[in-house]
Image (tube, rainbow, N blue to C red):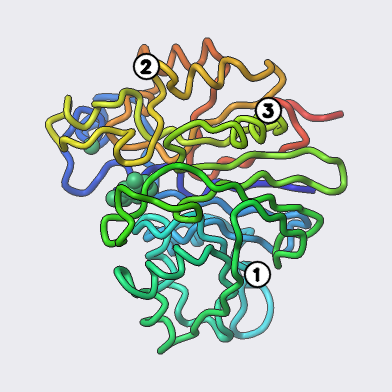
Amino acid sequence: MLKIRVLGSAAGGGFPQWNCNCKMCNGQRTGSISAQARTQSSIAVTGNEKDWLLFNASPDILTQLKQTPQLQPVQGVRDTKIASIFLLDAQIDHTTGLLMLREHAQPLCLWCTEPVKEDLSTGNPLLNVLSHYAGTQWHRVEPGNCYDAIPGAHDIKVEVLPLLSNAPPYSPRRDHPVPGDTVGVLMTDNTNDRSVFYAPGLGQMEPHVWDAMQRANVVLVDGTMWTDNEMQEAGISARTARAMGHLPQTGEGGMLEWLGKLPSSTRKILIHINNTNPILDENSSQRAELDRQNIEVAYDGMLIDIQENKTGTSSN
Ligand code: MLT
Ligand code: MN
Ligand code: ZN
């Protein structure tokens, strides 16, 4: 049965970020706010609790693997439970961890779109570097297609959706993304038809995305920023959340508005949370607002069992 382990719930930079003294990062470091540290964006998915499909390879992957006994090798002198790696985009926070997996005995089984592969062979040539180590075996992912035999995803159907977000700064398509620069997935457990929609980088709602979210029992979506101009307000960057390719939670057409239209039975979880986002503070008014709306905030180590409707409640 489909289970998800959140390996890293923070956006690029992690929380706290090494060079950041914003209210949240400083508050976490000094203990003046109640907030858990978080590593950079990645989840692992399994259908049989033996093999896993990794979504994104975070720069924090080695720490994440050490913290996750389910993913540690158990047989053979060199072994891994990660049967394949699926990249949702070519950003640093989702790809750099590939280099940390270079000691693998076989080429890494890698699933991504053509534009992502291109960025990882040019602007951010991780795949070229890796070819001198384990190497990769690339499986082309076409946005709009459905895959039902991805290693590690036993009895799981993976529907790939093109998303409007942004291409990385080192991409020739920065600020002019094409379909495939960022994708999301609707994963369905074939044994019981329950499904989860996962999109850590979602910049704009589109009909096919909204349709997938309505079909899902669990939505695990972009929680990068609370307000569009959060980075500006913190004196960090002039770029807005939307310009970076992330739908802010608040404001007209923001994520909370969309989540509010989903049935109350849909489990709603925010992930890929930027270190400036006040929802990281468990006692913030913004977090209280999420609680009121029955929206959860993902944390590292979180186990999401899509058979269950709510945290801690069982299906039987
Ligand atoms: C993003 O999600 O927009 C990027 O990962 C940001 C970054 O890490 O630079
Ligand atoms: Mn990111
Ligand atoms: Zn910060």
| Residue behind mark 1 | 83
Residue at x 56%, y 61% (from the top left corner): 86
- Quadrant in the rendering for residue 123: bottom left
Q: Is residue 12 visible?
A: no
Of residue 209 and residue 278, the one placed in the foreground of this image is 209
Q: Which one is closest to the eye, mark 3 or mark 1? A: 3
Tag shown at residue 51: none
- Quadrant in the rendering for residue 81: bottom right
Q: Is residue 306 visible?
A: yes
Instruction: Identify the mark nearer the N-term, 3 or 1.
Output: 1
Q: How many marks?
A: 3
Q: Position of residue 18 (x, y in %)?
A: 21, 49
Tag shown at residue 214: 3
Task: Name the outermost residue toward the left.
Answer: 235
Disc 2 versus disc 1: distance between alpha carbons? 40 Å
Residue at x 66%, y 73% (from the top left corner): 74
Q: Amino acid under label 1?
A: Ala
Is label 2 in a helix, a strand or a loop?
Answer: loop
Tag shown at residue 251: 2
Q: Residues within 10 Å of mark 1 (few under 14, many from 20)?
A: some
Q: Position of residue 28 (x, y in %)?
A: 27, 33
- Quadrant in the rendering for residue 235: top left
Is residue 285 positioned above or below 84 on the image? above
Is label 1 in a helix, a strand or a loop?
Answer: strand
Q: Residues within 10 Å of mark 3 (few under 14, many from 20)?
A: some
Q: Position of residue 200 (x, y in %)?
A: 48, 42
Disc 3 versus disc 1: distance between alpha carbons? 29 Å
